[in-house]
């Protein structure tokens, strides 16, 4: 056995080598992992809870075995026995014996993940699948020997024109006690699915005025839910969590690989995400002051791999061509079949997927934005671990998915992190001095403000999140620190101490403090690869539509809501367009889930729209690689970005000389202007 072990912490991806016998808490503290411990590692507070992920993790190059962590200690088995019951360990007690992957749950982090997927204000025609009706049921008599259920059904027809043809055992068991306790007055919940099959799914004695539904956006990184009052459509509360599947792999293909290499891995991930649904439902209900049992319906949007894992379907066919879905239709079932504990008869409606890499989340975006109803050629981009792209108008609609990876969320970036207090989210660089100023989440002050240090003392400056990464790279390009090919210019080191040698390349020092934050050449490359994949996917759709420009660009999702569209265009994430017609549209996928929750007719409608969507598979398109190569340049190798040039003074396109001084061919060459 080696005297050192490699440990990877998720969701941050931070890794290091530690002597065998080091506690997990000590390893986390040495790496700067955000793991809470208020008792100094004495096992008293119980807050440093972690999860040991067991299995093969090819992305990390680690086999994480159960025996690579010491067994539970007496203090864990004592007052903290509940911790062990939930499959967790105390980081201060558990010691490292071999290579492992350790997940830090969100409730063990000091600086909680800044998940912002607020409910977007939108007009929704109110016609939910679950409705309440109060009826006065005549008492039984010898002259009319009808059953109580038949009497209830007759009252629904007479008083509300509702034909309820089916029910279930739970309703039959509760029916007569409810009638007896409220002088034959009864509130009935009727569920009407997309096939117009009305079912009585719940009854209460007397008058019940409100029941609720939960609209959920199940993302690969975050899960967000909106609790809605089904009587009027109002959002009464929201809740969100990190997707616990992150510990099995940050990106979707890593999770598929985990399933392939670890028997039962799909079941572990299915259980983890369903448990998260239960946690969110409880949190949302508590915030609204209602009971979880008052939630009678759940609608879900998600990408195809999340879709399959959520439903307990093997996702491995989605890991390789032809990327076959188990179903491209919507799915309706009882929430209890998914082990999600709401009302015993609560229903779950999962929107349809479109293709192997284009999921129900894209269906939700289309339902919310309705590009199929307008004349303008609209590009909708939903950037996540994968980027979904929709292009077209009322005449024709195309969709594709581009493998951007998690770089835009802070992963694969040396100083990157997910959005949390202390993370840099805004950056400006002085064009003359090359000195930076920035804002962090949790403060409205810029870093050059005299009060900045005092105001951020509690959070510190901990890393750079997605929006900050976009801005710092765009600012470095506009300031001339990096060239059109993304190379950090070594000559700038003579002008500014911010540019320093880093092996055979150079880095830009963004912040020096308790933790030095530097933008390395590898960081620039990671973002270039991600943005090139996105732009190439967009270009393929333009090719198929036979056009060269779009009328409007809509950025969906939490990431799209927080990035500055100007900087996104400077980097070449999105194609050239009038900046006045580029903007965020909020969490459209979640809005689509809410529309499906509050208007049952939209469920059939979106099924019809999706049948017309043309699916473009980037993995099999011959031109994707050509577009990808050209899209590596900033903003692009050949596209002129004339609209952007009206708003931004773009540098002349140039290629930096990285050869040592005196070597032949060391002169910079100007190619052409970017505008």
Image (cartoon, helix red, strand yellow):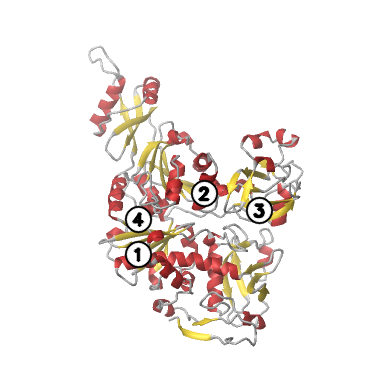
**CA–CA distance in space, label 4 to label 2:** 30 Å
Q: From this viewpoint, which residue is outermost toward the top?
A: 142
**CA–CA distance in space, label 1 to label 3:** 41 Å
**CA–CA distance in space, label 3 to label 4:** 37 Å
Mark found first going from the N terminus, 4 or 2: 2
- For label 1, the SS is helix
Instruction: Please say if 198 is above or below 122.
Output: above
The residue wearing badge 1 is 541
Q: Position of residue 212 (x, y in %)?
A: 42, 40
Mark found first going from the N terminus, 1 or 2: 2
Q: Which mark is residue 257?
A: 2
Tell us which disc is closer to us: 3 or 2.
2
Q: Quadrant of residue 434?
A: bottom right
Q: Which mark is residue 34?
A: 3
Left or right: residue 83 versus residue 149 is: right
**CA–CA distance in space, label 4 to label 1:** 16 Å
- For label 2, the SS is helix
Mark found first going from the N terminus, 3 or 2: 3
Mark found first going from the N terminus, 3 or 4: 3
Q: Position of residue 220 (x, y in %)?
A: 49, 51
* Residue 279 visible from this viewpoint: no
Q: Position of residue 471 (x, y in %)?
A: 54, 70
Mark found first going from the N terminus, 4 or 1: 4
Mark found first going from the N terminus, 1 or 3: 3
Question: Tags 1 and 2 in contact by the CB under 8 Å rule?
Answer: no
**CA–CA distance in space, label 1 to label 2:** 29 Å
- For label 3, the SS is loop
The residue wearing badge 4 is 366
């Amino acid at each position: 056995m080696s005297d050192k072990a490699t440990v990877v912490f998720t969701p941050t991806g931070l890794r290091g080598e530690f002597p065998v016998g080091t506690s997990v808490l000590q390893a986390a503290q040495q790496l700067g992992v955000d793991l809470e411990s208020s008792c100094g590692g004495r096992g008293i507070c119980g807050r440093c809870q972690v999860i040991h992920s067991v299995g093969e993790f090819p992305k990390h190059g680690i086999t994480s075995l159960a025996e690579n962590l010491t067994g539970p200690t007496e203090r864990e088995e004592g007052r903290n026995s509940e911790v062990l019951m939930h499959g967790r360990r105390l980081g201060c007690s558990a010691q490292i014996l071999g290579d492992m992957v350790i997940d830090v749950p969100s409730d063990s982090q000091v600086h909680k993940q800044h998940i912002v997927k607020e409910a977007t204000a939108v007009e929704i025609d109110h016609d939910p699948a679950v409705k309440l009706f109060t009826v006065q049921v005549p008492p039984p008599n010898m002259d009319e020997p009808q059953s109580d259920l038949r009497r209830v059904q007759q009252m629904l027809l007479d008083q509300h024109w509702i034909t309820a043809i089916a029910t279930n055992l739970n309703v039959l068991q509760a029916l007569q006690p409810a009638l007896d306790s409220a002088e034959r007055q009864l509130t009935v919940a009727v569920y009407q699915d997309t096939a117009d099959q009305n079912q009585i799914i719940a009854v209460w004695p007397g008058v019940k005025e409100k029941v609720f539904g939960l609209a959920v956006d199940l993302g690969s990184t975050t899960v967000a839910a909106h609790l809605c009052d089904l009587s009027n459509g109002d959002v009464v509360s929201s809740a969100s969590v990190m997707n616990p599947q992150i510990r099995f792999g940050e990106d979707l293909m890593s999770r598929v690989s985990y399933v392939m290499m670890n028997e039962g891995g799909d079941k572990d991930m299915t259980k983890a995400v369903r448990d998260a649904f239960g946690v969110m439902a409880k949190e949302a209900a508590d915030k609204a002051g209602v009971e979880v049992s008052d939630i009678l319906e759940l609608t879900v949007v998600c990408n195809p791999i999340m879709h399959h894992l959520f439903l307990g379907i093997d996702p491995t066919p989605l890991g390789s061509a032809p990327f076959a879905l188990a179903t491209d239709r919507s799915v309706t079932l009882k929430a209890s079949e998914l082990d999600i504990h709401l009302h015993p008869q609560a229903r779950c409606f999962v929107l349809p997927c479109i293709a192997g890499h284009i999921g129900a989340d894209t269906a939700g975006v289309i339902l919310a934005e309705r590009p199929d109803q307008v004349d303008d050629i609209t590009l909708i981009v939903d950037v996540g671990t994968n980027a979904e792209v929709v292009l077209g108008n009322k005449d024709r609609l195309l969709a594709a998915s581009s493998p951007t990876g998690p770089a835009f969320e802070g992963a694969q970036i040396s100083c990157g992190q997910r959005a949390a207090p202390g993370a840099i989210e805004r950056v400006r660089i002085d064009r003359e001095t090359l000195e930076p100023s920035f804002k962090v989440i949790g403060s409205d002050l810029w870093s050059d403000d005299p009060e900045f240090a005092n105001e951020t003392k509690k959070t510190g400056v901990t890393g750079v999140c997605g929006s900050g990464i976009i801005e710092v790279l765009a600012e470095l390009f506009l300031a001339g620190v990096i060239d059109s090919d993304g190379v950090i210019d070594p000559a700038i080191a003579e002008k500014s101490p911010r540019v320093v040698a880093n092996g055979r390349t150079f880095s830009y020092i963004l912040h020096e403090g308790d933790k030095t934050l530097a933008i390395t050449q590898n960081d620039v490359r990671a973002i270039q690869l991600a943005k090139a994949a996105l732009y190439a996917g967009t270009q393929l759709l333009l090719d198929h539509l036979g056009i060269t420009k779009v009328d409007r660009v809509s950025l969906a999702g939490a990431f799209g809501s927080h990035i500055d569209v100007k900087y996104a265009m400077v980097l070449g994430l999105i194609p050239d367009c009038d900046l006045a017609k580029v903007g965020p549209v909020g969490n459209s996928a979640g809005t689509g889930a809410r529309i499906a929750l509050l208007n049952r007719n939209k469920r059939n409608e979106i099924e019809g729209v999706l049948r017309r969507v043309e699916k473009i598979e980037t993995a099999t398109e011959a031109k994707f690689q050509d577009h990808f190569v050209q899209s590596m340049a900033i903003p692009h190798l050949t596209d002129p970005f004339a609209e952007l040039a009206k708003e931004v003074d773009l540098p002349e396109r140039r290629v930096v000389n990285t050869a040592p001084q005196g070597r032949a061919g060391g002169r910079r060459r100007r190619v052409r202007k970017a505008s």
